[in-house]
């Protein structure tokens, strides 16, 4: 980038992903912006940017890792400070959007929390939203600003193909991921199977049946996130009883709430493939965990937005 253009783009990060923010800034040959993030004694968040951002195109990198509510509030305060400091444009780069599983009402007197988060970000002052593999694509419609919906699926496809797994079946853990699983199966020249399950309450699922054959096959389950690991581990045991050989699992967002590490260690899954949209400690799963980086995708998307180029072209032909 030319020197005058560097001055127009600024990268800041919240406390949830300082490592990811630094890697993206380095990829774009920029210095990570300086910001003071502290708390008052009662837990209130204080934010102050330590350099001028007047007239800058600011990309604020933050993800909704644990503690989710703290990081959401920190993001809102950081956006408000950017707006009041006369930033020209504010793009919230949120690889994993919290509350995205609460995208509709399934029972009476429930909230649509994903819509609330979208409203909060819009009111705080963002001009654009950039995220990755939303739980449901229609969440983009909750925002009143442009949304760049990126995907880590091509990275996962490349990884699966690099392993040259024979007799491969791509498995969708539920009806909601069938479209993605079908695309992965086509790109990997594999068969497709679909698990049918019901969810009696949050973080609890029961595998009921399967459409497709996994007997004497190697299985790769594809999902958008793994939280407590109940669904993916239960599904693995279900398919093992049906005669599946090696069982792998992949997801974009390693939410990884307790007791996920214990469950994955004790499960029939031999490898768990995730990305770095949420920081996790690889040593907790040792040889079972593979972490793919989304730095290239996010960096290229930020660059394309800054130069008013197409973002979708980054993934053309890869899905």
Image (cartoon, rainbow, N blue to C red):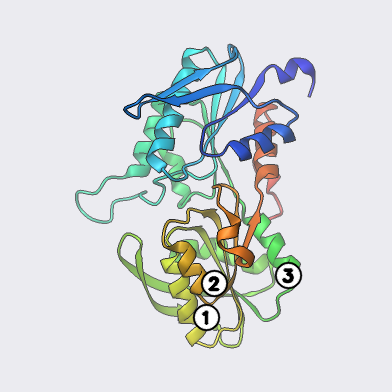
Q: Residue at x 34, y 69 (%)?
A: 198
Q: Residue at x 60, y 53 (%)?
A: 275
The residue that disc 3 covers is 163
> In whole angstroms, how far apart are the C-alphas of marks 1 and 3?
22 Å
Q: How many marks?
A: 3
Disc 1 is placed on an element classified as loop
Crowd tier of the residue under label 3, counting other residues whose Cα lies within 10 Å: few below 14, some 14–19, many 20 or above? few
**In x, y percent, where is residue 225?**
49, 57
Disc 3 is placed on an element classified as helix
Q: Residue at x 38, y 43 (%)?
A: 114
Closer to the N terminus: mark 1 or mark 3? 3
> In whole angstroms, how far apart are the C-alphas of marks 3 and 2?
17 Å
In the image, 8 versus 284, the foreground residue is 284
The residue that disc 2 covers is 171
In the image, 158 versus 314, the foreground residue is 158
Left or right: where 79 falls relative to 292 = left
Whether residue 124 is situated above or below residue 151 in the rendered picture:
above
Which marked residue is nearer to the observer: mark 3 or mark 2?
Answer: 3
Crowd tier of the residue under label 2, counting other residues whose Cα lies within 10 Å: few below 14, some 14–19, many 20 or above? many
């Amino acid at each position: 980038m030319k020197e005058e253009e560097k001055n127009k783009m600024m990268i800041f990060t919240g406390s949830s992903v300082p490592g990811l923010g630094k890697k993206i800034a380095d990829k774009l040959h920029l210095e990570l912006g300086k910001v003071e993030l502290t708390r008052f004694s009662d837990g209130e968040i204080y934010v102050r940017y330590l350099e001028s951002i007047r007239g800058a195109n600011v990309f604020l990198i933050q993800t909704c890792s644990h503690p989710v509510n703290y990081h959401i509030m920190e993001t809102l305060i950081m956006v408000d400070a950017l707006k009041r400091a006369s930033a020209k444009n504010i793009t919230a780069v949120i690889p994993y959007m919290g509350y995205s599983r609460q995208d509709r009402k399934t029972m009476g007197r429930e909230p649509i929390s994903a819509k609330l988060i979208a409203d909060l970000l819009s009111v705080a002052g963002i001009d654009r939203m950039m995220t990755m593999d939303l739980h449901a694509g229609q969440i983009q419609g909750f925002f009143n600003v442009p949304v760049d919906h990126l995907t880590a699926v091509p990275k996962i496809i490349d990884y699966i193909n690099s392993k040259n797994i024979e007799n491969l079946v791509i498995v969708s853990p539920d009806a909601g991921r069938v479209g993605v699983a079908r695309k992965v199966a086509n790109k990997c020249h594999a068969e497709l199977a679909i698990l049918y399950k019901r969810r009696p309450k949050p973080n609890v699922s029961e595998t009921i049946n399967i459409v497709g054959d996994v007997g004497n096959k190697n299985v790769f389950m594809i999902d958008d996130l793994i939280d407590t690991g109940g669904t993916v581990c239960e599904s693995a045991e279900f398919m093992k009883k049906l005669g599946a050989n090696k069982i792998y699992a992949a997801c974009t967002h390693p939410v990884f709430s307790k007791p996920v590490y214990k469950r994955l260690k004790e499960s029939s899954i031999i490898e768990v493939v995730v990305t770095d949209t949420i920081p996790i400690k690889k040593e907790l799963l040792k040889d079972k965990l593979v972490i793919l980086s989304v730095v290239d995708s996010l960096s290229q998307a930020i660059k394309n937005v800054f130069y008013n180029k197409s973002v979708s072209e980054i993934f053309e032909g890869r899905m």
